[in-house]
Image (cartoon, rainbow, N blue to C red):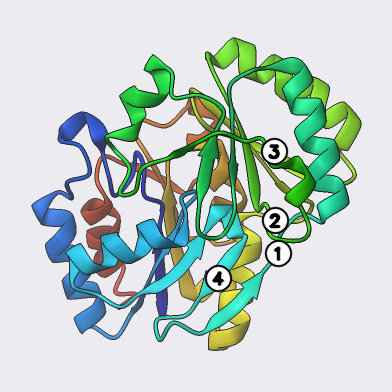
Amino acid sequence: MLKLFATDLDGTLLQHNKGGNNIDKKDFEAIEDLVQSDVHFAIATGRMDRDIVEVLKHLNQSGHRISQNGGFVYDHQGQLVHSQTFSGELSKRLHTEIAKHTKLYCVTTEDDAFVTEKTGLIRAFEHLMYFPLKEGVDFIDEYGTTLHPTKFIVIGETDEILGHQKVLMEQFSGEAESYLSDNHCVDIVPKGISKADGLSHLMKHLDMAPDEIAVIGDSFNDVPMLEMTPYSYAMSTAHPDVQKKASKVVDYVYEAIEDLRAQKLF
């Protein structure tokens, strides 16, 4: 039987082409029905934990929270289950190398997101965020003391950032993971970190097995969790290579939940 349902945010539960950060009414109702059927609800995203908290408030739910691609995991009671950040030394090296390749990047800690410059591209996306970005990243000497980065984000056009990703991973492949989380963003996180890793920590905490969970997402950073369970769904807007990793393809979150109910899994 199904014990946990985990959804991505951007492009999945939050379909920006259909109204900013609004959640489809049928998705809202399906999640409520799921929780009332004693299935745990979780959000797994590249966004920060504070964004998940805002979404859960909107849903009127107290779900589990997997943020920053698995960097932080909290259960529905707010208990920290797992966290991992870059070391100060690695943060400094990553920051230095990224700055050699591009002038547009973002550094996130557990509580804040800093961007080099609020360009037109950045401002076009900032309205989708629940909290404003902070401008300025001239704090490299603070890494490991007052600032503990969880993620570096390289921002730009897809072909350009994929080129930066290739070069950076040739140097840091043994120390970091990277994902194309959006057409304009490459996320760089500590080695071993992924949404699947975050879900694994949560499942261990809740005493659940992979065949007792279902997941849904739309981006390459969702692939690790799509591969971990037979009940995986990709959005129809996802890249074909992402869709191939899922068991089924749907247009909305509620369609995945309806399919799980049709299979009598809850």
Look at the numbered disc 3 and give the secondary structure of its residue: strand
Say which amino acid is labelled 4.
Val
Which label is found at residue 261? none
Look at the numbered disc 2 and give the secondary structure of its residue: loop
Residue picked out by circle 3:
178
Is mark 2 in CB contact (under 8 Å) with mark 1? yes
Residue 241 appears left or right of 197: left
| Residue 238: quadrant of the picture | top left
Is mark 4 in CB contact (under 8 Å) with mark 2? no
Say which amino acid is labelled 3.
Ser
Place of residue 218 in the rendered image (x, y in percent of width and height, measured from the top left):
43, 40
Q: Quadrant of the N terminus?
A: bottom left
Q: Earlier in the sequence, mark 3 or mark 4?
A: 4
Look at the numbered disc 1 and give the secondary structure of its residue: loop
Q: Is residue 50 visible?
A: yes
At 74% from the left and 26% from the top, the residue drawn is: 98
Closer to us: mark 2 or mark 1?
1
Q: CA distance from mark 2 to mark 3?
A: 9 Å
Residue 65 appears left or right of 210: left
Which label is found at residue 193? 2
Place of residue 149 in the rendered image (x, y in percent of width and height, measured from the top left):
67, 52
Place of residue 244 in the rendered image (x, y in percent of width and height, measured from the top left):
53, 36
Is mark 3 in CB contact (under 8 Å) with mark 4? no
Q: Earlier in the sequence, mark 2 or mark 3?
A: 3
Q: CA distance from mark 4 to mark 2?
A: 11 Å
Vertical side of 183 occupied by 245: above or below: below
Pick the front one: 142 or 94: 142
Is mark 1 in CB contact (under 8 Å) with mark 4? no
Vertical side of 131 occupied by 58: above or below: below
